Amino acid sequence: MPYPVRVMPGSDTAVETLGLRKAYRSVRGRVVGVEGLDLRVPAGGIHALLGLPGSGRTTVLRLLTGLAHADGGAIKIFGTPVPDGLPDLAGRIGAVVGEPGFQAPLSGRRNLALLAGAAGVPRARIDEVLARVLLTDRARAAYGTYSADEGRRLALAAALLRDPDLLVVDEPSAGLDAVGTREIREALRRLADQGKTVLLATGVLTEAQQIADTVTVLDGGRVLAQGVVADLLGDAEVSVRVRLDEPGKAATALRAAGFKVRADGDTLHVDGVAEPSDISRALAKQKLFVSELAPQREDLAAVVGRLRPVVPPTPEVPSRAEERAARKAAERQAAERRKAADQRKAAKEAAARQAAADAERAEKAAVKQAAADERAAARQVAADEKAAARQAALDERAAKKASSSKPDATKPDATKPDATKPDATKLDAPKPDAQKPKAGSGKPNTPKPDLQKHKPDTGKPGAPKPAAPKRGTPKPSPGAQKPSPGTQKPGADTQKPHRTEGTR
């Protein structure tokens, strides 16, 4: 895609190129110097070829002056084709490109005299050009004693010997100090004011802004833009950043002095300043002193970047090897993605299985705990019921015991004799004669108790059986005294009077 070209307004053209091409061969291969260059330089004034290193500005000058041959395209200078018409243009073109080739032992005047004799220029012209470049005082000094500035001005004087209509200068301020730069720029400006066409190549943005009338911005051997300097580059005025203790008071003072001030916190930006020192003088009059005064200029790289169009990258056709490599890389990436997907799927399944197993274990544990809680509750209920039954039985026995210990008025007292019944003791009492002791014995004849009469008849039917001892009743110890057969247990008479043989 070709770069857009800004065409200048219609005027007389001193130099014109169309589709100019030039390439160089080097150890690194083919190097493009100029590619499709369309250039228009108006007659009169100063035209600057502005570009970064490697932009092709010096190559253009060499092609215009015949020091290099173009690979293609067309060149016209004052309407004459170049290089075929260069002999006809020899007296109308002066060039300062590269080293001038002066002899160091010879004076400046002598070097110019040799060039004037070869070109057929009268010697009176030598003094004129020396005066024009301000070298009259140093004309008789040896060229080897000249400074860089004086050597550049002597080369410019040599280019002016034939009084050319077009002056071509490459890097006019290269290697010069501030004084030399100002003097060479003033000399070129005077020539332009005299009606000459000056075509200079420079990589200094301020140089083009200060002395050039029109400019062509080059980038990579192509024209980015061309036109009036003020339209493309702006003027040489800069924006200055100012910092001081009282920014509000300083802004008021600068506005009163005619400056354009923008406030940014405690920092002031003053736009459109030709000389930054004017700001410090204006503030000093108000007894305000700056702590920082920093000019902010747009450099050439910023200009080129601003003018450079955004070109979409051209897709390159890959080779077969690159296609195979890309295909293998794509397959490898696809395999890695599938592997990663399988790993993620397996991890999810394992997590799901683990979660299901945990849930199952938790459910079993919950069921087991519920069964254990149910059994514990059943045991607790059974224990409570058993304790209640035991307590009820104890209470019932206690009640029975309490009721049996109270005498019953409806039943006869076994300890008192019954008047309605004969006394058994009297019936069974021995006869008086039996009570008497035998003759001759000192002891009374005591009758033996009839144990058979007092034994309960357990063999007869209907006879009451002896009551079994209740549970919990302590057994009599072996050494305890047995009750006599005639002795009854307490409470036995209250249930049923004891029957003896005398009562039957």
Image (spheres, rainbow, N blue to C red):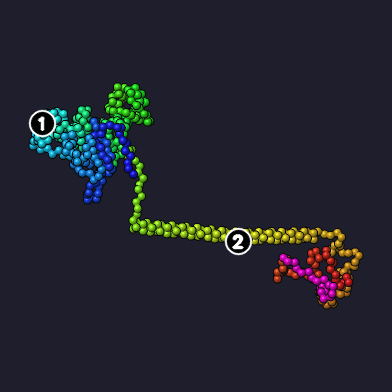
Left or right: residue 316 versus residue 178 is: right
User: What residue appears at the point 35 percent right and 42 percent down from the top-left corner?
Assistant: 310
- Position above or below: 494 against 446: above
Q: Which mark is residue 122?
A: 1
Measure how far apart labels 1 and 2 are at the Cα level: 128 Å
Q: Quadrant of residue 357?
A: bottom right
Q: Quadrant of residue 278?
A: top left
Callout 1: few (<14), some (14-19), or many (20+) C-alpha neighbours within 10 Å?
A: few
Residue nearest the viewer, comparing 283 with 465: 283
Residues rendered magenta in the picture:
452-472
Q: Secondary structure at mark 2?
A: helix
- Position above or below: 497 against 254: below
Task: Give amino acid for label 2.
Answer: Lys
Percent across and percent down for residue 135 are: 13, 30
Number of labelled discs?
Answer: 2
User: What residue appears at the point 35 percent right and 53 percent down from the top-left corner?
Assistant: 317
Percent across and percent down for residue 54 are: 25, 42
Q: Which mark is residue 168?
A: none
